Amino acid sequence: MLNPKDITEKKAKGEKISMVTAYDFAFAQMAEAAGIDQILVGDSLANTMLGYKTTRDVGMTEMLIFVGAVCRGAPNTHVVADMPYLSDKDPQTAYDNARRFLDLGAASVKLEGTPQGVLEFLCGHDIPVCAHLGLLPQTAENFKQKGKTEEEARAIEQAARFVDNLGCFEMVLEHIPEELGTRITREVKSVTIGIGGGRYTDGQVLVMHDALGMHQKKIPPFATKFVNMFDLGVEGFKKYIDSVKNPAL
């Protein structure tokens, strides 16, 4: 399993880092078998697995179940546990919840933004932290690209330097201009993982359901569908139904 130091060393060597979301035992096994560097158990499971409209609809109860399942399915892979909405509302609450994830087998936790005093407290208490900057789904008013204005870009860049100096080993850069993602990647020691952050971040992450084509909805402009599992699954179910209704065939 890659630890934070291993992941940071990949950046120093110029090696790209692969990350994908997974939410259950079976797909975690699949991702590990494929050789993925990191699995993110994202709060996006609110949408992809539970059918909610917003990631704010899941909390620690749900996240602990899914993180545990992924850790059991991929015991030799670095699992990043996403801190759900309000689980990091203050430093002590964030620490207590982060410890619950690590006790389940997660290797690190991910937090959106720079909540007051929280990142400092976690990094100061030996919690491996992956920051998350740019578009922040838990609190976003819309899902338009961030960092397009000079003011927004400056704020994101300042936040990146801040979390880098704190000792966050990694940061997700979501839906920002490629130029900004490239500049941040060059400026910081931390590993940058893009999801709509351009081609030149240190690594990339995609939502599994987008990458594997597990739904029929439009995928984000920065995502790529590498296989159409939705159609494969429907076809498989149809063949099963036919075998039940026509056992002689």
Image: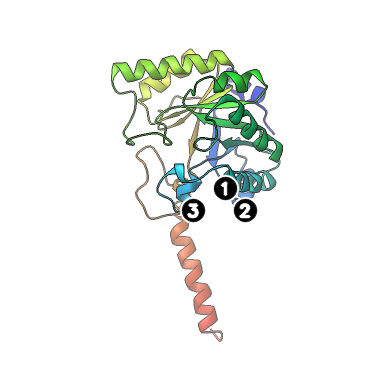
Image side of residue 225 versus residue 5, left or right: left
| Residue 244 against residue 50 in the figure, above or below | below
- As shown in the figure, which amino acid type bears the numbered disc 1? Glu
CB-based contact (under 8 Å), mark 3 and mark 1: yes
Labels 1 and 2: the sequence-earlier one = 2
Q: Which residue is mark 1?
A: 62
Q: Position of residue 167 (x, y in %)?
A: 59, 17
Instruction: Give residue 141's mark.
Output: none
Circle number at residue 26? 2
In this view, the mark in front (3 or 1): 1
Q: Earlier in the sequence, mark 3 or mark 2?
A: 2
Residue at (51%, 67%) from the top-left corner? 236
| Earlier-in-chain disc, 3 versus 1 | 3
Looking at the image, residue 236 sits to the left or right of residue 10; the answer is left
Q: Could you classify mark 2 by the number of other residues whose Cα lies within 10 Å: few (under 14), some (14-19), or many (20 or more)?
A: some
Q: How is the image coloured?
A: rainbow
**Residue designated by label 3:** 50
* The N terminus, quarter of image: top right
**CB atoms at circles 1 and 2 under 8 Å apart?**
no
Q: Amino acid at mark 3?
A: Leu
